Amino acid sequence: MTDIACSEALRPDAVSMRRFGSRPNAALAAAKLGVPVLDVVVPVYNEEVALADSVHRLHRHLRDTFPYPVRITIADNASIDDTPRIAAELATELTDVRVVRLEQKGRGRALHEVWSGSDAAVLAYMDVDLSTDLAALAPLVAPLISGHSDLAIGTRLSRGSRVVRGAKREIISRCYNFILKSTLSARFSDAQCGFKAIRADVAKGLLPHVADTGWFFDTELLVLAERSGLRIHEVPVDWVDDPDSRVDIIATATADLKGVGRLLRGFASGSIPVNAIAAQLGSSRRSAAPGSLFRQVVRFGAVGVASTAAYLVLFVLLHGWIGAQAANLVALLLTAIGNTAVNRRFTFGVTGGKAARHHVEGLIVFAIALVITSGALAALHGVVEQPHRLVELTVLVLANLVATAVRFVLLRGWVFHPRRTR
């Protein structure tokens, strides 16, 4: 997109003069109040090498292409190198550049504090390495200024995106977004691209409910917005990986998985008040409860893996005491009860009454699974009088896979069928 095209797309006589839904035009509102339309936050920690060049590039781009008042905020996350001095010099040298110093690290903490205190109508952020092509900035914020959307994200996983990065990061990114889709029912395509924007009025309602202060901040904000019925606009971006990235992938992935678990517990218990947030922001909430076959298969599989592991441990512990058949019966019975309870809530999203009926029917399904596994075990002993323990376990695992598939079909199509759980 050329500079002229970017500017025209944002002018009041183009898209931004119209109003979509219930959101007012942000440019007109900002003009009445005499505040910036856009505040672009650049979180930094020990970025003395890249900071000056990146901020100069961003400042030139905004000056030449953006037709509204704009501010750049350097959010210093407790840097201990020369970053604070360089940031202060940039704020003195360049108009509409300021510095906010935080005494604690955390990208989420920086965005939360700066966005909460900003007077701009639209809030954005980007990584200091400017991995995302700046030409995508106008398409990112235009729907927010016009009132069409509530949040906007850059996506590296769209067909229209052009991405240069290693296979390792590509696989990690796609696996992470797969986890979000299968566990949290996320519909956005790229949670971690460092290129996002939000309307200030929407941020005011969402930020108090976002707990994470690190890298999971983006994901939590997006999931909360989606569950509250807000509109998220996606922009394909051209993105080049920074080879000098200092992100600890293992630590970040661990924190992200903990964050996913925390959100799952919050939504299940009702401690995350999505209905209240939706009402406050005036959105018509669209239910994101798990319901699709794909999500149910993934969730059922996760529960099944845990159940199978518990079953095997119990079988091995009980085998020498009560024999193979009895050990199989007890281990399968105990894990089946827990499996039904977890699948009821986690996989099929069923709460409230009829729990007793569901467990009775779950035991019937268990009996069918028992026939399959016990039959396989009996067949093995019919062929081999004293099979090796490893062979016995292998047969049981394969039989359990078949039994698991049968259980899923029966649970989904009979025990927890929507018509019977309303």
Image (cartoon, helix red, strand yellow):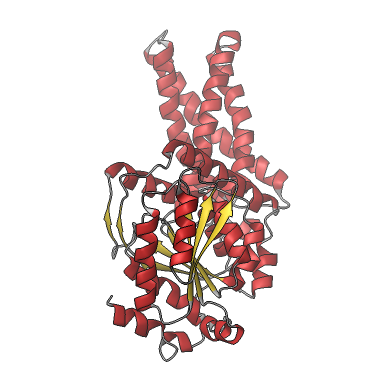
Image quadrant in which you'd find residue 284: bottom right
Say which of 278 and 43 sits in front. Answer: 43
Determine the residue positioned at 70% across, 46% down.
355
Determine the residue positioned at 35% across, 71% down.
61
64 relative to 239, above or below: below
Q: Is residue 184 visible?
A: no
Q: Is residue 230 visible?
A: yes
Quadrant assignment for the N terminus: bottom left
364 relative position to 46: left or right: right
Determine the residue positioned at 57% across, 33% down.
367
Q: Residue furthest bottom?
A: 13
Whole-percent x and y of residue 79? 51, 46
Whole-percent x and y of residue 276? 70, 66
Determine the residue positioned at 56% across, 69% down.
230
270 relative to 123, above or below: above
Whole-percent x and y of residue 75? 52, 56
